[in-house]
Amino acid sequence: MQEKLFGYAGKQLRISLSDMKVTKEELDPKLIRKYLGGTGYGIKVLYDELESGIDPLGEKNKLVFTTSPLTKRQVPGGGSLEICFKSPLTKTWSESRVGDEFGFAMRSAGYDFLIIEGKAKTPSYIVIEDDKVEIRDGKNLIQKSSSEKAEVVEDVHGKGYSIMTIGQGGENEVLYSAIMINNRAAGRGGAGAVMGSKNLLSLICKGSKEVKTADQNKFMKAVKDTHKKIKDNPDTNGFRKHGTTGDMGDCDDMGDFPTKNWQSNSWGKGDELYEHFYKNNLVDNKQCYKGCPVGCGRIALVKEGKYKTPLHEGAEYETLTAFTAFVLNEDVDAAVHCDYLCNEYGIDTISTGAAIAFAMECYENGLLSEKYTDGLELKWGNTEILPKLVKKIANREGLGDLLADGVKNAADKLGGRAVDFAVQVKGLEAPAHDPRSGKALAVTYGTGNRGSCHIHPVEAMGFDAGKMDFSLSEFGLPDPEDFDRWDEEGKGKVVKLLQDGGTIPDIIVVCKFMLYVGAEIKDYADMLTGLTGWEIDGWELLEIGERVINLQKLFNQREGFDREDDMIHPRMGKIPAFGKYKDQKDCAIYNYIAMLDEYYQERGWDKETGRPLPERLKKLGLEAYIT
């Protein structure tokens, strides 16, 4: 008799768009215990069900929408959803988290996971309401913005649904297009393009079911204890007041502010940029779901002028930095406007800003002919072209068509020195944190399984520059105070544990910012124990984290990625060309190879190929994946 699952709805919903088939499948408790949910379950499905070498924009790719037992309103950070897929931008494993209430709706409808496969013959959208699942005609949604699509389906079906859409960027298969829920984006890696390639324009969900808990008292005690830690943490109120955007000045000061397409790691303007935003654009903070104890989201606008922009949620640190420092733009109103446009078109703000910075440097060096520039002067700091380029990228018009494929692909097409200006790892454009502020970040950028992303490196940045341990000291993480941020020896070893711990929120599907304001990994282990009835501790969560990272690595290896793809872009380690750190030789990275070797040694991966060794795979229960 199969073990009863507590804490889970117990089913996954599989929708084949090609043959309009809907299947409801029971979950396997043994498999669930090994991977829990989120990106853990997502990589298991994708590795087992995808053939190597498939076209990410073809019918064979899949979108896996994942939750976990912690996808509950009471849980700090529980309003999260992880979307897993093979990336059309990088051809690697990819994941993208979004904060909102779609995960709640899925579980209330009776599903922990949703797998979308195949391709609809015509533009469509999906309606899920408990046991009723419909694939509807979506022709009235074609080429509407993400918010317009949401308005249309709400007009048809009424309120009460959680609504997910793509914008024109997804329909036009911009390789870094996003899936949008309200103004929240599952932004990186191109999930929107995958959804668009399937002729799926929207997905709406609501439900009325309850998920049974093994021990409600134990669960609620852990929840209340964690909420108290967060409430009492001295950083919580500041995070609520300023969000991630409030870091612009500090990041600039510490050399963690990539500027002019990574030619420098500081600009000296971070404080004044944020001051303008705080005084002129910021309206309020916002929770991404009702119940979040922090509410770090930003509600912003531009009241008047040529960049007048309606009230919307967005304008986070990464976005504002991408549209200011990346391109030497000092007009914050223009950056806020570009953020709004990216949300409406449904394209990733980080990759969009990086692509424009890349184009500016190519233009400066004579690599973009008139057939590409469309008469635009792509000069550094030319604010007026920014929204024009956002629109061109989303609609794949002119130069936008080149940039919509990402900087790596664009550089390959342009040839010559363009590769020097395409700052990326594995094809994913680098975000707004700089390894020259702390060198552990270089290793996380290089070895990140989805490329140089802004999520999995944050622990390395926090360790080196912020001297944070993320509650990992009891599991063997060295004291960050024992390291200088510019040390290289020891950083590869440290990164292994930071990654294992840092990926746990993605597996249990909670917002990792809770770890910045007092929540600990063992707190979530206690919640899981109460919800599922399994005795789970922090050590088991770390083992699951390591298992998942290894299986993601094997997915990438099967796609042809090896040690060479774990190298960082040379510009990330160079002495800055200008700015506060231009004479600070210690911030340059001198022996990345040694850091990478140290990391491989700690991981139990082959130093020549980067492949996980059989002994490590056996230890992690991954014997079936030894080749």
Image (cartoon, rainbow, N blue to C red):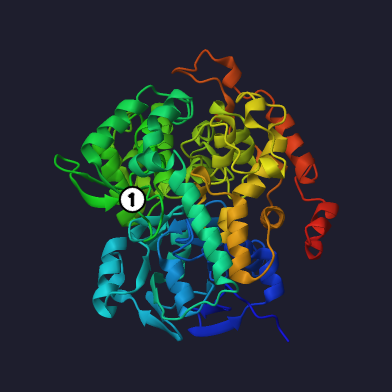
The quadrant of the picture occupied by the C terminus is bottom right
User: How many marks can you see?
Assistant: 1
- Hey, which quadrant is residue 336 in on the image? top left
SS type, badge 1: helix
For residue 299, above or below residue 540: above
Determine which quarter of the picture holds residue 45: bottom right
Dot 1 amino acid type:
Cys
- Viewer-side residue, 116 vs 101: 101
Q: On the rendered structure, is 309 left or right of 150? A: left
Q: Is residue 356 visible?
A: no
Farthest residue, direction top: 583
Question: Which quarter of the figure is the N terminus placed in?
Answer: bottom right
Judge whether 48 appears above or below 209 on screen: above
Q: Position of residue 409 (x, y in %)?
A: 51, 46
Between 92 and 103, the residue placed more toward the observer is 103
172, above or below 90, in the image: below
Looking at the image, which residue is at 54% across and 15% down?
584
Q: Badge 1 is on which residue?
A: 342
Residue 62 vs residue 561: left or right? Answer: left
List x then y, in percent, for residue 245: 37, 39
Residue that appears at 33% across and 56% down: 183
Residue 148: % across, % down: 26, 65
What residue appears at the point 62 percent right and 70 percent down from the top-left corner?
A: 532
Q: Nearer the viewer, residue 327 or 37?
A: 37
Q: Residues within 10 Å of mark 1 (few under 14, many from 20)?
A: many
Q: Nearer the viewer, residue 367 or 329?
A: 329
**Percent position of residue 534, x then y:** 68, 68
